[in-house]
Structure formats: structure tokens, C-alpha cells
């Protein structure tokens, strides 16, 4: 496991529990948590202790992490994926199979993670993971359902067999584009839904009807985007789309950002607050990326457009409900 963020650590914990020889390698960026991982045997952002058989090593011990490696799980966020891949390749020389857990696109190039990793490792035995996978629940061994995507699908089947357990259900697909573009929209959807949570706290109300309608609109727009990018509609209706969008909208960092905005915080203030708490909110970059993709494809996505305007154009957060006027049916 390369990268000791919360999700990377949780995945390493799961793999170690399955009796796989697993090494969690922390990069220079992970130094703030390495002491806790090695001395306390716990990641500060996770609710469970590390399994005994999980080895943790630091930046200087890349050789130990890469020795006789079968599968390299890449734990960087989308903005750091290429850098991590280069560091690992410099130290390892080769990576037979890559499993990428980052959700989103590479900034500026807007390339999906599978393309970024393929360019750096020199082959296409790349798997992207989607679905409702909250790090805290994976760390605790609670039931999780994920979808592994690769083209051809044989690589996803091979990698999925290492992850599959009674608590970690794995389905596979060859719709790599569908899974990867679902990950772009689900965090943006969570920000928008979270705004209603913040508005509800201020008003002392529930906003349940509006949240359901807003989620429906977000899901419809996500399907339109994914199909335009070459993915399949059934992928959006499954774990990678509906499942991940739902769990992210119910909890997590992106929903929390939206809640702060709904309570009246400015986007920069809210981001700085979360960053001080050690939280990276990928949905902000994803909103920018999605806005660019929609313009290129000539798509009219009013919900995603409103979230973008709130984040980058000083639109008032309550404006997010304005897109509900366009719902059909």
C-alpha cells in the first residue's frame, strides 16, 4: 500500500486482515501521521487499531514496501497520483498490477486516474475502485461493497479476489470510464446536499423534501455526464454512481464542507477550517473539473453549475435549491 492517508491505511488494514502480506508505506507527505502509525498503531483519523500483521514503513524504506510485490495499491489523492506513481516507480522499477483508490481527475489535464497511472507505469493493468467505501467503516471491518473496474475486466477480477471477503463485497466491470467519471460527480453532489444540511441547522428545520429532490437532480445530471464521457448508464445506477453518491451525501468531508457553506461560511473559510482538521476535500477540484467537462461536451447541468458558482463565483449558498425548478415529472 503506497500512501498512508486515511483511506490508504484503511485499505491496508483490510488486506492485512485477509492474511495477505501487506506493507503500508508512508511518503514524505504522510510524516505527520507516521509516528502515530508506528508507535500507537493507529491512524489519527480512523477509529480502529492496526492489525498486528500490518507492517508500516517510512519514506526511506520504499524497497521494503516494494519487495516481491504482486499488487500496488496507490493511495494518493487525484492531485498527487502522478507524483506518487513516479516516486514508487523510481524505487521499485516495476509494478505488475495497480489498484487506484483516488476518486477524481488529474488537475489541469483532466485525465482519469487509470490513464495517469498507465502513463507512469508503462502498462494498462490498472484497476480503479468505486462504490460506497468510507475509510472509517473499512478500518473497522464493517460491511462494504465496492466495484473494481478495468479494461479488460480480467485485471479487476484478479485484484478483486485479493480484496474480497465476507465483509468486503466486490463486483467487477469493464466500464472503466463509467466508474471513473462517477467519482468526479459524487463529491460535488455531496457538497450541494450538505448545503441543505447547513441551511436546516440555521432554520431549525429538516429540509428532507428538498434534499431528496436535490439528490435526484444530482443523480440525473451525473448520469448525463457519465454517458457523455463514454460510460454506461447502468454503471451510474449501481455502486459506483448511486451507491457512492448516496453514502457521500449522508456523511464525509465533502458533505461537511457543504454544511459549513449552508451555515453561512465563505468557501475559502470553510476549506481552511477543514484543512486545519486534517481533511482534504476533493469535491472542490472536482467541481471545477466537472464544470470544464460539461462545457466541452455542451451539457446543461444546472445543479452542478450552481455548486460551481457557489464555490468559485460568490453565489449565495441557498441558491443551490434554484435548480429544483427544472425537475421533470
Image (tube, helix red, strand yellow):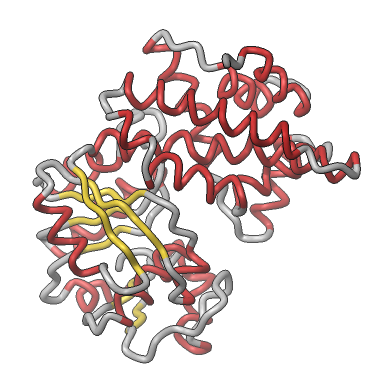
Q: Residue at x 73, y 44 (%)?
A: 259
Q: Residue at x 50, y 11 (%)?
A: 300
Give coordinates of residue 116: x percent, y percent.
25, 40
Q: How many numbered marks, from 0 up?
A: 0
Quadrant, the C terminus: top right
Give coordinates of residue 193: x percent, y percent.
65, 37
Q: On screen, 22 above or below 307?
A: below
Q: Is residue 172 left or right of residue 52?
A: left
Q: On screen, 147 above or below 304?
A: below
Q: Is residue 252 left or right of residue 264?
A: left
Of the pair 80 and 238, the residue shown nearer to us: 238
Q: Residue at x 48, y 25 (%)?
A: 220
Q: Quadrant of residue 158?
A: bottom left
Q: Is residue 211 visible to us here?
A: yes
Give coordinates of residue 59: x percent, y percent.
35, 71
Give coordinates of residue 72: x percent, y percent.
21, 63
Q: Residue at x 13, y 68 (%)?
A: 70
Of the pair 160 and 82, the residue shown nearer to us: 160
Q: On screen, 109 above or below 94?
A: above
Q: Is residue 94 visible to us here?
A: no
Amino acid at each position: 500500500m503506497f500512501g498512508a492517508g486515511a483511506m490508504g491505511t484503511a485499505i491496508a488494514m483490510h488486506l492485512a486482515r485477509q492474511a495477505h502480506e501487506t506493507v503500508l508505506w508512508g511518503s514524505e507527505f504522510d510524516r505527520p501521521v507516521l509516528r502515530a502509525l508506528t508507535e500507537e498503531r493507529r491512524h489519527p483519523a480512523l477509529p480502529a487499531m492496526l492489525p498486528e500483521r500490518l507492517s508500516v514503513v517510512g519514506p526511506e524504506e520504499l524497497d521494503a514496501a516494494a519487495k516481491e510485490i504482486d499488487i500496488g495499491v496507490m493511495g494518493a489523492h487525484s492531485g498527487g497520483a502522478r507524483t506518487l506513481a513516479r516516486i514508487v516507480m523510481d524505487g521499485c522499477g516495476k509494478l505488475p498490477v495497480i489498484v487506484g483508490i483516488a476518486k477524481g481527475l488529474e488537475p489541469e489535464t483532466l485525465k482519469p486516474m487509470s490513464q495517469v497511472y498507465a502513463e507512469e507505469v508503462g502498462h494498462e493493468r490498472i484497476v480503479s475502485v468505486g462504490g460506497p467505501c468510507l475509510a472509517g467503516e473499512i478500518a473497522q471491518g464493517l460491511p462494504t461493497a465496492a466495484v473494481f473496474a478495468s479494461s479488460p475486466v480480467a485485471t479487476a477480477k484478479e485484484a478483486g479476489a485479493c480484496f474480497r471477503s465476507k465483509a468486503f463485497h466486490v463486483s467487477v466491470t469493464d466500464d472503466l470510464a463509467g466508474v471513473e467519471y462517477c467519482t468526479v460527480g459524487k463529491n460535488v453532489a455531496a457538497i450541494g446536499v450538505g448545503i441543505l444540511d447547513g441551511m436546516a441547522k440555521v432554520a431549525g428545520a429538516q429540509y428532507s423534501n428538498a434534499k431528496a429532490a436535490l439528490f435526484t437532480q444530482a443523480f440525473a445530471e451525473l448520469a448525463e455526464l457519465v454517458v457523455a464521457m463514454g460510460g454506461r448508464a447502468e454503471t451510474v445506477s449501481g455502486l459506483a454512481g448511486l451507491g457512492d453518491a448516496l453514502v457521500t451525501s449522508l456523511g464525509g468531508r465533502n458533505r461537511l464542507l457543504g454544511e459549513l457553506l449552508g451555515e453561512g461560511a465563505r468557501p475559502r473559510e470553510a476549506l481552511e477550517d477543514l484543512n486545519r482538521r486534517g481533511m482534504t476535500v476533493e469535491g472542490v477540484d472536482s467541481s471545477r473539473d466537472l464544470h470544464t467537462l460539461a462545457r466541452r461536451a455542451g451539457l446543461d447541468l444546472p445543479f452542478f453549475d450552481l455548486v460551481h458558482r457557489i464555490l468559485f463565483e460568490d453565489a449565495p449558498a441557498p441558491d443551490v435549491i434554484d435548480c429544483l425548478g427544472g425537475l421533470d415529472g
